Amino acid sequence: MALKIYNSLTRQLEEFVPLHEGEVLMYSCGPTVYDYFHIGNARTFLISDIVRRYLEYKGYAVTLVQNLTDIDDKIINRANEQGIDTSRLAQKYVDAYFEDSSRLGIRAADVHPRATEHIAEIIALIQTLIDKQAAYEIDGDVYYRVNHFAEYGKLSHRKPEDLLAGARVEIDERKEDARDFDLWKKSKAEEPWWDSPWGKGRPGWHIECSAMAMKHLGETIDIHAGGHDLLFPHHENEIAQSEVATGKTFARYWLHVAFLQIDGRRMGKSESNFIFVHDAVEQYAPEAIRHFLISAQYRHPLDYNPTSLSESSSAVRRLSNCIDALGPYRDVEEDTSAELNDADAASLRDGLDTMRQNFESTMDDDFNTAGALGAIFKFVGEVNQFLAATGDQSSDVGRSVLSQAYNSLVEVCGVLGIYAEEEGASDEHAALTEALMTLILEVRQDARQRKDWATADKIRDQLDALNVELQDSRTGTTWRIIKGGR
RNA sequence: GGCGGCGUAGCCAAGUGGUAAGGCCGGAGUCUGCAAAACUCCUAUGCGUCGGUUCAAUUCCGACCGCCGCCUCCA
């Protein structure tokens, strides 16, 4: 089964073949650290994370680089407002980025380069562009000469005249061409600066990604991902800078994530209609937020609203209930023989095979996470049905298939990050909690035996208030902690 | 003006030239002391509108309507 990726460059679904067999070089545009990031930003970061995980699932060795833009106008303005250093402000939000993204289950990239730590590389790259006549200096500012690059516009599919016709930018009269953009910005008073051949200044926005991608991944990378808003001008400019400097293809597959909307409009910082991940994570379980963010294919807009989030919470709970119910079978030895002497078990294993096939074929189709969820939940229904029918009476074969089901579901959900295994705060506390719960449930069981329903229900209700849910069954009472409340 | 996206059941959302995955919500049951969880059944002759191609279109083509985005910092 071949993975296909929609390449913004060609506007087509293309079979994915990495530059080096078995390895994937991937670059994802990260945050500008002047504030917390919102759920819209999270969608892109999450998709990068899932693309990476799925490629690993398929056996590729993936190197993921995600930049942190830690110097730019917004950072300078925000730092000035707060009367602190730009570096201090940036560090605060770098820390916040890692905290919030890890709470969302987004794994850190292999490298998180920062613009301010790559000034030398940036300067060298600009110098190369000047040497090649692709850039020019005017009074301490350096601009990229767009006319030098005949293919300018190939990513955004724009013609030069279109770019000028729609230009709403204030045109700097000193530039040779209105489309030329900053590579190096001369510092104004009170602004942070670095020394360069053109005087004190700081890098323009686009150049850092070219310099850092090349430094950490090489001159040609496989996948370059980012939000759809970066397609133009950011990514277009990255191509222009990089390809003129090296004479090589910069990125082979360009992947752009559609916007998250809210009330039918784009969620954006400048729209001030955003919801910080920082806050969302207080209200909803990370798995629920992830489920929501991947409930539509990444190239389709998705609308944020509380209803969708609570739908995702319910869906994720259903999934979690199922996998937890399979937990007891996780260590049963798997019987992988082709012939199963138990018809129900055989049918469940067919369902499992189908689930895996559909998961892969749908993910191979440009990371169609919505379709993948469909495959997973269909199988969840089959597992529940099997468990309801056989329960503890399962045959050895049945138990073996349940074990396979558990491991497959955990693996597949791991790619999407929609199931979290129970993890206690610490072993010590987990053991204590376990012991206390056993005690409480014994007391309640005694009450139930006396038909003292008032006491039994009081215990259940009070535990429920603590997000501990009890479930009585013929074989006893089980409990679980409801993550993220309800 | 240029370029692009979206419009599928009450809500979210896959999908296919041959007759609509999955989730949520709702209703009726089973189980249970009551719940919860789970299971069973029910919930789109229909996929924005109008035409066209075809034996057959939601799926292809054309026109139109509505909503959104990029073209400026923004994931």
Image (cartoon, coloured by chain):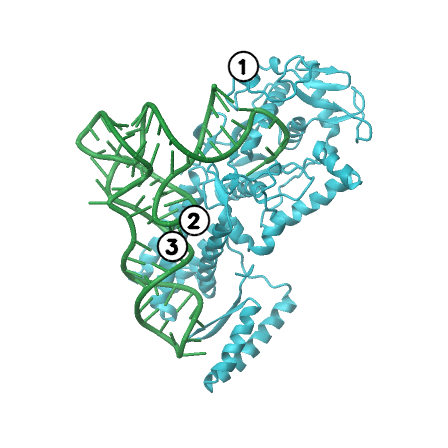
Q: According to the image, label 3 marks what residue?
A: A379
What color does chain B have in the rendering?
A: green
Q: Residue at x 47, y 87 (%)?
A: A450
One can see residue A82 in this view: yes
The answer to which of A245 and B20 lies nearer the viewer is B20
Q: Tell me the crowding category of disc 2: few under 14, some 14 to 19, or many 20 or more residues within 10 angstroms, Cα based.
A: many
The image position of residue A146, as x and y in percent, is: 62, 16
Residue type at mark 2? Leu
**Judging from the image, what secondary structure is the residue with disc 2 in?**
helix
Q: In this rendering, which labeled residue sits more in front, label 2 or label 3?
A: 2
Q: Chain of mark 3?
A: A
**Judging from the image, what secondary structure is the residue with disc 3 in?**
helix
What color does chain A have in the rendering?
A: cyan
One can see residue A341 in this view: no
Mark earlier in primary sequence (2, 3): 2
> How far apart are the alpha carbons under marks 1 and 3?
53 Å
The image position of residue A480, as x and y in percent, is: 52, 67
Q: According to the image, label 1 marks what residue?
A: A161
Q: Chain of mark 1?
A: A
Q: Using the image, determine if residue A395 lies above or below residue A121.
A: below
Q: Using the image, determine if residue A172 lies above or below residue A407.
A: above
Q: Residue at x 58, y 50 (%)?
A: A105
Q: According to the image, label 2 marks what residue?
A: A373
